[in-house]
Image (tube, rainbow, N blue to C red):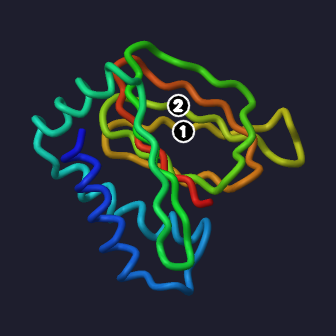
Amino acid sequence: MEKLVKIIENSLLEINNSIGDKITSLFYLESIKFELITKISSLENSIIEDSIEDLDKSNNFTKNYPLEKKELKLKISYFENSVSKIKTKATNDQLSIVIIGSKNISIYDAFKKDRHIETILLNNMGIVVPVNTIFNENVGKKSLVLDLLYL
């Protein structure tokens, strides 16, 4: 787990330095999404397997990162069994990346509650969800998911 966290930490610092202070919140998360996915997708299987073993004991890892004028919360979770969350309201702008497995997300229209769009995230795919967005999520079994919240 330590190797995965260290790689993510170094990537976040590197990406943060290249972006600068002018981009914040939702745009910041969108800016780092593809670079972070590229770094994660090139990881060795052994690093991911070790992380899953460590997370299997504790279910998730959480750490806050104060970066200059921003603060991020990193959460890495392993789901042995599938998990569903219905009509969750995003309390922060958040980036969700599926390292292994799958995650289905339904995002509801703010004005017409019966309208929604669905997307399926598979390995090395991510989505940025804005604060106050109402969404359902279904995480498939044996999934490793990284969530990055902009605090």
Q: Which residue is mark 1?
A: 119
Say which of 99 and 115 sits in front.
99
Q: Residues within 10 Å of mark 2 (few under 14, many from 20)?
A: some
Q: Are marks 1 and 2 in contact (CB under 8 Å)?
A: yes
Q: Residues within 10 Å of mark 1 (few under 14, many from 20)?
A: few
Residue at position x 50%, y 65% from top? 30
Q: Which residue is mark 2?
A: 104
First along the sequence among labels 1 and 2: 2
How far apart are the two marked residues, 1 and 2, measured between alpha carbons? 6 Å
Please identify the quadrant where the N terminus is shown.
top left
Residue at position x 23%, y 24% from top? 53
Q: Circle 1 sits in a helix, a strand or a loop, which is it?
A: strand
Question: The residue under label 1 is which amino acid type?
Answer: Thr
Residue at position x 38%, y 46% from top? 125
- How many marks are shown on the rendered structure? 2
Q: Circle 2 sits in a helix, a strand or a loop, which is it?
A: strand
- State left or right for residue 100 relative to residue 103: left
Residue 113: give x, y in percent of width and height: 86, 37
Say which of 86 and 62 sits in front.
62
